[in-house]
Image: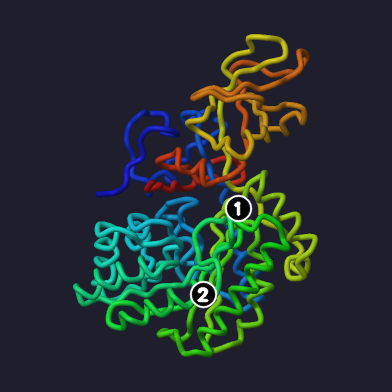
């Protein structure tokens, strides 16, 4: 049965439509043929970001396994795989299953795998015979639990030693813990294979801390490699969230030519980017990273939300039909980008002083000036910060061209 479009962003007739047919309808955002609020993806920006990251990773000789939790969209997973992604990263066992259904046959769970129900989901993927699954371990207790469970079922799971920092999240804190975990994995040769080293550098906070934990990860990787602790060749050395992937590439690049090492970066938000934390990170990357400077371009925001102005209750306030159920607000409120009055030829830029000051479930409070030409029924297009927590609010998103005509749709599986 085809995936159906229904709910938010539905086309004008209120019926249901297969997602694959959405681009055939010729719906126009500007002609008010789409129910608002609606989340849209700008096709040209998606294509640009895919190519930008392909060029960036190629320059460093590293692989890309984008974090799927950002979008949880099978169509976008396939887009990334078709663009050359080595695999897909996820955070949970159910997400791993969704990645597999989308076509991923290398799946990296950037998390610990705990509990028999979660282990059973991963066992089902391994039993297909054509799928590699990696998960993280940072304790002997978890390694033993995995060893017992997979040994009893005659399956072998690839595990990555996770490096952590004091006061941070998961991951071993020192070399003593690292050696204890590696030794425990080695006690289960039929069930577990130490396949590499993983780190999430983002918990370090600043560049000095990020580089320190990355260098420690390289040193641990080299010690384990030299001690023949890895059962997979090449063994994985993997890191990189969406804010520091350039620094990870720089620190890991020395091993990219080593036949015994496979360097895998895992940013997820690059595909849609944003106008908040990741725009700030992109500015830093553009200023300091030699590969990015040579490329001469940066990532572009691709995820936007359209909504109507539905009230001007006070001279300096407008209420927009967009709320916490539609857009992320943890890392900053949506930012007005375009203003369109139905019947005009094309949208114009939103006024620079328009600012969302508060959000409720279905309403955004927009600070304006009394003399601003902003009316009920006008349409506003917003950029967002933190795409992860916008994607999870939508069952589908419309893909639009530069004229704001719907050319495709993608679904989400949160």
In the picture as drawn, the residue positioned furthest to the right comes out as 287
| Above-or-below relation of 83 to 411 | below
- Check contact, mark 2 vs mark 1: CB within 8 A: no
**Spot occupied by residue 364 in the image (x, y as percentages of width and height):** 58, 24
| Above-or-below relation of 221 to 362 | below
Q: Nearer the viewer, mark 2 or mark 1?
A: 2
Q: Badge 1, how many Cα within 10 Å: few under 14, some, many 20+?
A: some
Which residue corresponds to the image point at 69% horizontal and 19% vertical from the top-left? 374
* Element marked by disc 1: helix
**Spot occupied by residue 213 in the image (x, y as percentages of width and height):** 63, 67
Task: Say the numbered circle drawn on residue 80.
Answer: none
User: Would you identify the image quadrant in which residue 220 lies?
Assistant: bottom right
User: Would you identify the image quadrant in which residue 30 lies?
Assistant: top right
Question: Taking 319 as reference, is 228 left or right?
Answer: left
User: Would you identify the image quadrant in which residue 303 lies?
Assistant: top right
In the picture as drawn, the residue positioned furthest to the front comes out as 176
Looking at this view, is 162 or 377 the one in front? 162
Looking at this view, is 54 or 268 the one in front? 268
Residue labelled with disc 1? 44
Mark-to-mark CA distance, 2 and 1: 49 Å
Which residue corresponds to the image point at 33% horizontal and 32% vertical from the top-left? 15
Work out whether mark 2 precedes mark 1 in sequence or the reverse, and give the earlier one: 1
Question: Taking 181 as reference, is 284 left or right?
Answer: right
Which residue corresponds to the image point at 40% horizontal and 73% vertical from the top-left? 159
Residue labelled with disc 2? 176
């Amino acid at each position: 049965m085809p995936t159906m479009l229904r709910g938010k962003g539905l086309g004008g007739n209120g019926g249901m439509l297969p997602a694959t047919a959405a681009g055939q309808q010729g719906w126009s955002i500007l002609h008010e043929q789409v129910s608002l609020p609606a989340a849209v993806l700008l096709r040209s920006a998606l294509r640009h970001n895919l190519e930008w990251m392909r060029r960036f990773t190629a320059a460093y000789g590293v692989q890309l396994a984008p974090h799927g939790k950002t979008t949880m969209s099978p169509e976008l997973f396939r887009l990334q795989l078709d663009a050359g992604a080595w695999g897909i990263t996820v955070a949970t066992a159910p997400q791993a299953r969704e990645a597999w259904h989308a076509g991923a046959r290398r799946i990296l769970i950037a998390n610990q795998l705990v509990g028999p129900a979660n282990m059973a989901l991963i066992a089902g993927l391994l039993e297909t015979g054509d799928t590699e699954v990696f998960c993280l371990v940072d304790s002997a207790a978890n390694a033993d639990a995995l060893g017992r469970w997979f040994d009893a079922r005659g399956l072998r799971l690839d595990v990555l030693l996770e490096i952590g920092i004091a006061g941070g999240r998961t991951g071993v804190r020192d070399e003593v813990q690292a050696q204890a975990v590696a030794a425990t994995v080695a006690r289960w040769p039929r069930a577990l294979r130490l396949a590499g080293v993983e780190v999430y550098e983002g918990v370090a906070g600043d560049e000095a801390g990020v580089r320190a934990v990355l260098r420690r990860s390289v040193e641990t990787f080299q010690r384990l490699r030299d001690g023949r602790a890895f059962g997979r060749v090449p063994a994985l050395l993997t890191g990189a969230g969406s804010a520091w992937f350039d620094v990870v590439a720089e620190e890991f690049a020395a091993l990219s030519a080593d036949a015994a090492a496979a360097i895998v970066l895992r940013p997820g938000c690059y595909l849609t980017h944003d106008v908040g934390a990741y725009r700030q990170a992109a500015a830093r990357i553009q200023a300091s990273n030699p590969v990015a400077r040579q490329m001469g371009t940066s990532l572009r925001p691709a995820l936007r939300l359209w909504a109507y102005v539905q009230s001007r209750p006070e001279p300096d306030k407008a209420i927009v039909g967009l709320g916490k159920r539609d857009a992320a607000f943890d890392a900053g409120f949506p930012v007005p980008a375009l203003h369109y009055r139905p019947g005009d030829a094309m949208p114009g830029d939103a006024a620079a002083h328009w600012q969302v000051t508060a959000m409720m479930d279905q309403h955004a409070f927009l600070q304006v000036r009394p003399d601003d030409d902003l009316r009920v029924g006008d349409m506003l297009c917003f950029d967002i910060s933190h795409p992860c927590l916008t994607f999870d609010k939508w069952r589908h998103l419309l893909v639009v061209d530069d004229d704001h005509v719907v050319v495709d749709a993608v679904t989400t599986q949160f």
